[in-house]
Amino acid sequence: MNRIGFGILITVLLLGLQWPALAQQQDSEERYQQINEQTEEIFEQVLEWRRHFHQNPELSNREEETAEYIADYLRDLGMKVETGVAHTGVVGILEGGKEGPVVGLRADIDALPVKERTDVPSKSTKTTTYLGKEVGVSHACGHDTHIAMLMGAAKILTDMKDELQGTVKFIFQPAEEGAPPGEEGGAELMVEEGVLEDPNVDVIFGQHINSQTEVGKIRYRPKGTMAASDRFVITVKGKQTHGSTPWTGVDPIVTSAKIIEGLQSIISRQTELTKAAAVISVGKIESGVRNNIIPEEAEMIGTIRTLDTEMQDIIHKKIRHVATKTAESMGATAEVEIEEGYPVTYNDPDLTEKMLPTLQGVAGSEDVILSDAITGAEDFSFFQKEVPGLYWFVGGMPKGMDPAEAAPHHTPDFYIKEEGMKLGVKSMVGLTVDYMNQHSSQ
């Protein structure tokens, strides 16, 4: 064989080796284009759903009308529907035409006791009683968009039911913002009641609209992406005395001040912050009844945020040590209670790596951004403790806007550009189809 013939042979062999990858890439591009077209076709309906829920917000564990609306729609799509999960949760099951894994898709559905101040046509004017006070109610965190995006994904996935290689479990979760005092709720209760079973969920996907990320962009992070949130109460007991003679007693207020300073040194001097971020904040301190009495007792309440479970355990131990030993040095005593709340929202690294091409496929590689971790918390983490999960942020801020000027979540001026929901619908559908294709037995 001459040199030219040998070169042709090598070229043919290389093309043969590359052909499956090229064919797969073409298939993916065609699939994402189809998902894009399907999203455009139903987007007016997605807008209608979002505006309905925006005008009719309901607080945690009180989402009765919201749940009924969702359940009726899922039934209209022909799904098997379960209601009353974790009080007001709704679960719909879509069985594909072929065997394959079970994919969980989650949206949270509760609103907040925040009076809306934005001037939009679907503005909420609803009020209710919360903890004995008359309050406004609004979707000041964007959960209304989460519902609408997942309902849109449900429509598209139902339309392609015969081609689906597996089962989809649509999980509409109440009380993400936390159940009212004295009640259980949210993702933790859903897991306890078996939402990830019958059929058993293999993987779960969830997303959050973000008012400070541009429309058309996705932010993600492998491993710890949102913090564990723990509540602590420190009760300092001293000895009551007259304010004019502090040496005849033990001042719990001064002792508390020393403890607070010590708590901050746990973060600034005793925590390996290059490994992961951590926060200790005292949000409330209460003591005393009048100006000239040094009281007997003081109470501090605060929050702990950690992004690493090992660091979380260490910080809990150090809080107890600092509080009790500082109090002892002042002649007082301290009792420490730490109530574990939401775990770390942990994106399975292998799953994140495998599904990243899908996010890049639906959004464009340049618009999928590896972001820093967030010290806010999210109870999607309870699902991730049971099965591998991926949680990401989809942009809702108008293009070109300065994020510093965008109203944060949980505020009266919170605003979402509705066009951002298109990418949320496409993400949910794309991840579901691609995961099934990767893990199907057929």
Image (tube, rainbow, N blue to C red):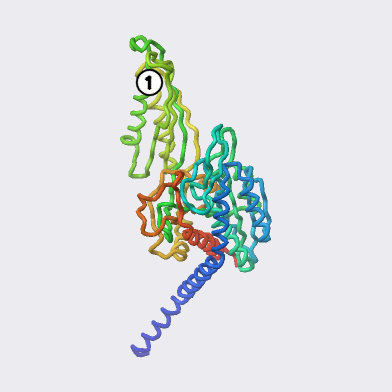
Rendering coords of residue 403 (x, y %) = 36, 52
- Tell me: residue 279, above or below residue 153: above
Residue drawn where x is 58% and y is 58% of the image: 151
Residue 131 x/y as whole percent: 55, 33
Horizontal and vertical percent position of residue 392: 46, 54
In this view, 430 is above or below 199: below
The image quarter containing residue 255 is: top left
Residue at the far left in the pictured view = 269
Residue 164 is drawn in which quadrant?
bottom right
Would residue 114 be found to the left or right of residue 268 on screen?
right
* Pointer 1 residue: 253
Residue furthest out toward the bottom: 2
The amino acid marked with disc number 1 is: Ile
- At x 59%, y 51%, the residue is 172
Q: Where residue 286 sits: x, y (%)?
A: 43, 24
Foreground residue among 210 and 369: 210
Q: Is residue 20 left or right of residue 168?
A: left
The N terminus: image quadrant: bottom left
Quadrant where the image shows the C terminus: bottom right
- Taking the image as shown, residue 92 lies to the left or right of residue 426, namely right
Looking at the rendered structure, the secondary structure element under dot 1 is helix
